[in-house]
């Protein structure tokens, strides 16, 4: 009986070239890509032929989604913290009691610091910050900053004796002031000779307003945001767009 | 014999299995592809006038009627241009034209609009001047940030200013958009240094002579509430492409609504989408 001899094939595949290609691809992606920021709402920005790069740091991002919901965000965690402190200070008395334990409670503070976007009305903020992360994300998605809630702040220099702001305006002001305060702190520390982690020469000294609106956002919502910004003397913005080649 | 056997080296298998490495690479690449975006966002500058109630009538920039183009951004991607050559004609609907976005539409309307029947339409003249400036910029040395261009400060300031290529380009572009098309040598892709220096000085001192300026278009952009943000960005982009220095995003006035409303048959669709409540009574009936 003839023995059936199965021919043993050599199944070894050389993976080295494959590995080479992979390393190349990986390097390409790591060098050319930038991380997607964790955003609550997804927006598709319109296309334009502008070739001006968006500043990498010190931006105050205003996101407006298709339904016109407005969110604020910044890339600086410290700024968020300063902003919270500013809003919790005396000028913002209406919700002071509600947010009193926010100031003291470290866990709630940590929760706020972890936020990348602001979009919860003041009234609900205290309750919101006490929730779990999943609940927070869900609520934030359905919320958005109110543009027309009116908050009065006493101002003795005015005829009427008060300034009237919307929550959106207060947050913008708080974030901008927060950043300025942080920058001044850094300058002070540098003067004293303490080590600081940033290069003051290349860091801008104020936040730049970047508006990121969806292409299908109705103009009326955009107009509302712009009007609110003009009211607090913010008149220079950067509109975020996607680069498009000439057709 | 035994000695010979000893000298025979043992052949080691030096083949390394790269499969796990490839697996890992695949994972990493997938991660990067999902978590990053390649497209870098671009920024478009927008400056709105600050709300100042104390704005005097004389401070307002007055542009000539024949050099003003009004664009109505209507819902559903509709765009209307309104160009009149005399103030008295305001309200006459035959000047209201429906145009499309893009190269063949609004860009053509703007770049061929020629109220003075010049050889070159005003917008075209500016675009050509910018092309010359771009040509000059492309010819410059690699180092565009070091101050290397000397511009004489003149009598008023005394000191000379040093411009880097980039600064000079920005300055020249502002000048061209204002109507100083003569800072470049027409069609030669070159900058006219002497003229440029004079213009820079004049702009600084505010002694520009109106008769030396080429006519420039001003554009009133009037988006309706139901127009999309995309429409607005498209128009702002068009302003960049056509090098229009003077444009303003204005509010729709009652007259504007009336104008769009009187052409009822032509803009029937428009009326349905717009908020009829805001329309004047006479139009809404």
Image: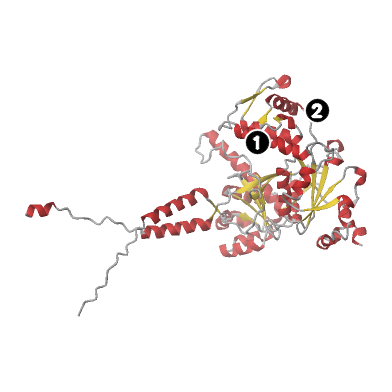
Q: Is residue B50 above or below residue B197?
A: below
Q: Residue at x 60, y 60 (%)?
A: A129
> Residue under circle 1?
B134
| B172 shown above or below B113 | above
Kindly identify the residue that appears in the image at 75 percent across and 57 percent down: B77
Query: Measured from the top left, where is residue B229 in percent x and y?
Result: 72, 54
**Residue sitting nearer the eye, B253 or A188:** B253
Say whether residue A156 is visible.
Answer: no
Q: Secondary structure at mark 2?
A: loop
Residue A74 seen in the current view: yes
Q: Which mark is residue B197?
A: none
> Residue A131 or A55: which is nearer the viewer?
A55
Q: Which residue is mark 2?
A: B209
Q: Nearer the viewer, mark 2 or mark 1?
A: 1
Dot 2 alpha-carbon crowd within 10 angstroms: few under 14, some 14 to 19, many 20 or more? few
Point out residue B14 in the picture as x, y percentages from the top left corner.
Answer: 27, 55
Give the residue displayed 70% in from the left and 47% down from the top. Answer: B237
Helix, strand or loop at label 1? It is helix
Q: Earlier along the polypeptide chain: callout 2 or callout 1?
A: 1
Quarter of the picture holding the N terminus of chain A: bottom left
Circle 2 chain: B
Question: Which is more toward the observer, A125 or A62?
Answer: A62
Q: Position of residue B45 (x, y in %)?
A: 68, 44
């Amino acid at each position: 009986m003839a023995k059936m001899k199965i021919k043993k094939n050599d199944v070894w595949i050389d993976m080295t070239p494959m590995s080479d290609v992979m390393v190349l691809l990986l390097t390409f992606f790591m060098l050319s890509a930038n991380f997607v920021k964790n955003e609550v709402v997804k927006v598709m920005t319109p296309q334009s032929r502008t070739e001006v790069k968006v500043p990498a740091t010190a931006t105050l991002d205003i996101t407006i989604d298709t339904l016109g919901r407005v969110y604020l965000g910044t890339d600086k965690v410290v700024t968020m913290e300063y902003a919270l402190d500013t809003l919790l200070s005396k000028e913002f008395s209406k919700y002071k009691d509600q947010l009193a334990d926010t100031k003291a409670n470290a866990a709630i503070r940590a929760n706020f610091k972890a936020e990348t976007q602001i979009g919860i009305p003041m009234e609900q903020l205290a309750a919101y910050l006490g929730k779990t992360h999943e609940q927070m994300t869900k609520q934030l998605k359905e919320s958005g900053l109110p543009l027309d809630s009116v908050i009065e702040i006493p101002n003795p220099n005015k005829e009427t004796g008060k300034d009237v702001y919307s929550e959106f305006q207060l947050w913008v002001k708080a974030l901008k002031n927060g950043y300025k305060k942080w920058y001044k702190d850094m300058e002070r520390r540098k003067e004293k000779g303490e080590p600081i982690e940033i290069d003051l020469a290349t860091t801008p000294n104020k936040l730049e307003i970047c508006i990121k609106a969806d292409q299908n956002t109705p103009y009326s919502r955009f107009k509302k945001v712009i009007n609110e910004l003009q009211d607090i003397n913010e008149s220079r913005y950067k509109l975020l767009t996607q680069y498009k080649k000439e057709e | 014999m035994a000695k010979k056997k000893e000298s025979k080296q043992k052949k080691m298998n030096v083949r390394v299995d790269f499969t796990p490495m490839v697996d890992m690479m695949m994972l990493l690449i997938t991660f990067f592809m999902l978590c990053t975006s390649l497209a870098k966002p671009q920024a478009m500058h927008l400056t709105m006038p600050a709300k100042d109630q104390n704005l005097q009538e004389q401070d307002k920039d007055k542009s000539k009627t024949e050099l003003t183009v009004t664009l109505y951004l209507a819902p559903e991607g509709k765009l209307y241009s309104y160009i009149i050559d005399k103030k008295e004609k305001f309200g006459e609907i035959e000047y209201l034209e429906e145009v499309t976005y893009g190269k063949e539409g609004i860009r053509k309307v703007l770049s061929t609009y020629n109220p003075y029947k010049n050889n070159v339409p005003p917008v075209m003249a500016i675009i050509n001047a910018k092309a010359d400036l771009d040509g000059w910029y492309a010819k410059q040395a690699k180092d565009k940030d070091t101050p290397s261009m000397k511009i004489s400060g003149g009598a008023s300031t005394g000191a000379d200013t040093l411009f880097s290529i980039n600064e000079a380009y920005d300055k020249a572009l502002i000048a061209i958009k204002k109507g100083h098309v003569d800072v470049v040598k027409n069609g030669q892709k070159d900058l006219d240094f002497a003229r440029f220096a004079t213009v820079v000085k004049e702009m600084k001192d505010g002694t520009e002579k109106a008769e030396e300026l080429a006519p420039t278009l001003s554009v009133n952009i009037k988006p309706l509430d139901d127009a999309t943000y995309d429409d607005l960005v498209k128009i702002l982009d068009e302003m960049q492409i056509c090098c229009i220095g003077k444009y303003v995003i204005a509010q729709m006035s009652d007259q504007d609504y009336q104008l769009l409303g009187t052409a009822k048959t032509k803009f029937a669709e428009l009326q349905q989408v717009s908020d009829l409540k805001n329309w004047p009574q006479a139009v809404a009936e």
